[in-house]
Image (spheres, rainbow, N blue to C red):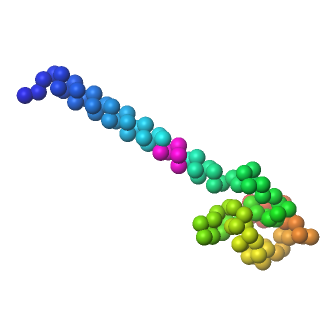
Amino acid sequence: MTTKSHEHLKRSDMIVHNKLVILIMIVAGSLVASSAYSQVRGEGRYGFSERDYPGYNYYNYPAWRGHFRDRMYYEHYRHRFYRQHRRYFRDGRFDNDRWERRHY
């Protein structure tokens, strides 16, 4: 035997539950989006420069021993990048304009 107050409590519990689920999804989405964004840009945080790692913006190798887009990553792949893209280097500098014309 259900009463109106029992039905009202059941309905309000469902509304609270739905709001809670939506809130959790928003918070989780925000955390995922902010952590993904932080991996994309490393220049400002780590101070990499074209002088240190010429062409570093174009390194597209997989993570190396858990490192991705940090100093150890660039050090590990530097020699491979130089060998694979030798034609884009001139006097130790990477020709970004030539790369952009060729790939984009």
Q: Quadrant of the N terminus?
A: top left
Q: Main secondary structure of the magenta part?
A: helix
Would residue 102 be visible to someone looking at this image?
A: yes
| Residue 69 horizontal side relative to residue 20, left or right | right
Residue furthest out toward the right: 91
| Residue 12 horizontal side relative to residue 89, left or right | left
Magenta span includes 83: no
In percent of width and height, residue 84 lies at 75, 76
Residue range corresponding to the magenta coloring: 28-32
Residue furthest out toward the bottom: 83
**22 lies above or below 64:** above
In percent of width and height, residue 72 lies at 70, 67
| Residue 65 horizontal side relative to residue 101, left or right | left
User: Which residue is located at x 34 percent, y 36 percent?
Assistant: 18
Would residue 98 be visible to someone looking at this image?
A: no
Residue furthest out toward the top: 4
In the rendered image, which quarter is residue 92 located in? bottom right
Q: Quadrant of the C terminus?
A: bottom right
| Residue 30 horizontal side relative to residue 38, left or right | left
In the rendered image, which quarter is residue 53 located in? bottom right
User: Which residue is located at x 59 percent, y 66 percent?
Assistant: 66
In percent of width and height, residue 56 lies at 76, 63
User: Which residue is located at x 47 percent, y 40 percent?
Assistant: 26
In percent of width and height, residue 102 lies at 78, 65
User: Is 15 in front, or is 74?
Assistant: 74
